[in-house]
Amino acid sequence: MKDIEQLFEKKFGASSCAFTVRAPGRVNLIGEHIDYNDGFVLPMALPLSVLLRVRPRDDRKVILFAANFDERREFDLDEIEKQNNWIDYVQGVAAQLLKLDLPLRGFEGVVSSDVPVASGLSSSAAIEVAAALAFSQAEQYSLSKKEIALLCQRAENEFLQVNCGIMDQMAVAACEKDHALLLDCRSLEIEQVPLKLQDHAIVITDSAAPRTLAGSAYNERRAQCEEAARILRETDPQIQSLRDVSLEALERAALPEIVFRRARHVVSEIERTIEAARALHADDLETFGALMNASHQSLADDYEVSSAELDWLTNWARARPGVLGSRLTGAGFGGCTVTLLEREAAGEFFALLPKEYEAATGRAARCWICTAQNGAEVL
């Protein structure tokens, strides 16, 4: 906090009118590739976060310095045009706020982040939600967490041209400390599920593998899911999406093999996510860990979005004493894994994994112990 205040003063001078917004990254504990199929997801907010310290201006200019890139960018609220860099996330949010006829004023400030970029931990959603909070705080009006999530999703869909679901923005906006967020991606109803980790820990491991196939594979998998739902709808008009399909009905249907396997992952993953939430309510972390393992195998075998690095990390973790479960998280093909383990096993995990992973893959992994944090807030 002090670092961003000092950097702000260095770049823009001292000001009593400046304020700071924090928006966390998120990790999805289970429920992968489910949000665009109207299913349930179970993310938590991370200690890793985007900080945005700004001072309102009297004109329509937005001027930001990004500490991570050591560069300054700006735009005018009356002339929003894509710049093809990080400030487009802020521009996209501004464009959506303008569509809602909400009052906007410019601001100047500093943005800093320790959420790894392109690792599947929602660095983009974090800066979008931070920007939405900054604009609303500058004009002293409030938006609900659901409103913020939806407008940030529209910013990503329409301005950034990324066809994402609602999970990332809702998790960043609405998570609560020491809880996972069970989100119904159809109704947008949320439930705060207690995450009791006194003797256990969540470890995020960044594989450092580039997610070069994630974008094209995401669009392909989404199309395959839509194709499965379309075929199933021919015999049951009540089916809107794979959310409405049981495993029994799926196995009876005449689907092409690859489409069947994609759909089987989705239908089974929705069931696993509901079971996982029940397990957390019952403080049954053994069952939760087993569901994480089953999720990864489904993502690797049926959905085919894992990679050699992600499989290595999950297989290595599961072989360690004290590990209850490990799975890839995010779109896949690179990015991160999430592991549930006994807290006393974390020291050896951290000591051995980086060097053994580098010896096996030539890549340098990073690990974090993460507790569930609050969603975005004005500090």
Image: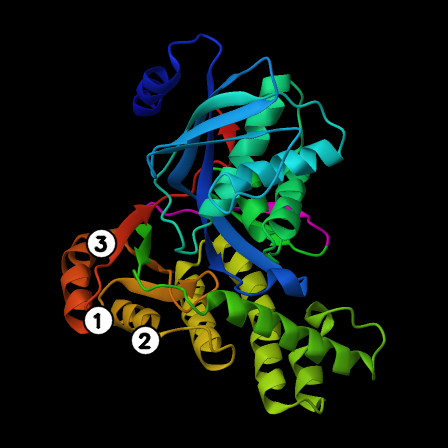
Q: Residue flagged by tag 3: what amino acid is it? A: Ala
Q: What stretch is highlighted in magenta?
A: 187-199
Residue indicated by mark 1: 361
Q: Residues within 10 Å of mark 2 (few under 14, many from 20)?
A: few
* Discs 3, 1 touching: Cβ within 8 Å: no
Residue drawn at (51%, 77%), measured in percent from left and top?
303
Q: Is disc 3 placed on a helix, strand or loop?
A: helix
Residue sitting nearer the eye, 123 or 203 = 123
Q: Residue flagged by tag 2: what amino acid is it? A: Ala
- Label ID, residue 80: none
On-image quarter of the N terminus: top left
* Discs 2, 1 touching: Cβ within 8 Å: yes
CA gap, disc 2 and disc 1: 9 Å
Residue indicated by mark 2: 308
Q: Measuring from the top left, give residue 180's x and y in whole percent.
A: 50, 48
- Left or right: where does residue 277 sit relative to residue 80? left
- Label ID, residue 346: 3
Residue drawn at (67%, 44%), measured in percent from left and top?
150
In the current view of this chain or complex, which residue is farthest to the right? Answer: 237
Q: Which of marks 2 and 1 is nearer the N terminus?
A: 2
Q: How crowded is mark 1: few (under 14 residues within 10 Å), some or many (20 or more)?
A: some
Question: Which quarter of the figure has residue 111?
Answer: top left
